[in-house]
Image (cartoon, grey):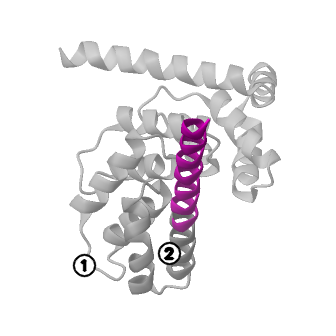
Amino acid sequence: MLRQRMVMAVLSLFFTLASLHASTTEQLAYDGEVAFYHQNYLEARKALQPASEQGSLQSSYYLGIMSLRGLGTPANYKEAIRIFKAGAQKGHPESQVALGVLMIEGIGIPQDFIEASALFIKAAKSGNPDAQLILGWIFKNGIGVKANNTIAYALWNYVAAQGNDWARYNRDAMFYELDETELYRGQELSANLPKLWNAISLEHKKISKILRKKRR
């Protein structure tokens, strides 16, 4: 009985400490984000750095933005890209978007449209609206994928339904570019996300396969 009580006491202490650690990390991350948006970058770094070290991917992302843009610290593309890559590999949508944009522009990293589009697809599937918007532009212009107006329309139609004015503007501008069948298909896809993500993945796999053969 005494041994059982000791085990329970140790477990209780463990969960209490874990809870305190989580709340401290969350508070640091929150304080750092507030300071960042108030452009108090020195204070932001003081909170974001320990939060990042304790596992906050969002805090790491803000540190990456600060390194990229030289906010409160000299601009350092290499460090920003290192941070975004680490976050992207762990599935952080904002880091995936940031890294994808840099890959498309070739800023501090070689241009790679295929890998960039793959990053946007991952972030879009996670529900990131910026990724969904950019992915629409990618399919509209054939950046790292074969141009597909139906998918571009479906993405913008979906994001527009969430109240995004930019997506609505782009969707409406495409209306007269689509025939009746394409329009119907685009509306169908935007109303069925599993089908939309499946269509997007298939298109990306096609172009990736073609390019891999060309590189051999």
Instruction: Report x, y in % for residue 71.
Output: 37, 79
Q: Pointer 2: residues within 10 angstroms few (<14), some, or many (20+)?
A: many
Q: Which residues are magenta?
A: 1-24
Q: Residue at x 27, y 53 (%)?
A: 82
Q: Which residue occupies the foreground of this view, 172 or 68? A: 68
Seen in the picture, residue 76 relative to 11 is either above or below; the reply is below
Instruction: Report x, y in % for residue 52.
Output: 40, 61
Please give left or right for residue 91 compared with residue 198 in the image. left
Q: Is residue 149 magenta?
A: no
Q: Pointer 1: residues within 10 angstroms few (<14), some, or many (20+)?
A: few
Q: Is residue 24 visible?
A: yes
Q: Amino acid at mark 1?
A: Pro
Give the quadrant of residue 165: bottom right
Please give left or right for residue 3 compared with residue 170 in the image. left
Residue positioned most to the front: 2
Q: Can you identify the residue that label 1 sits on?
A: 74
Can you tell which mark lies on residue 32? 2
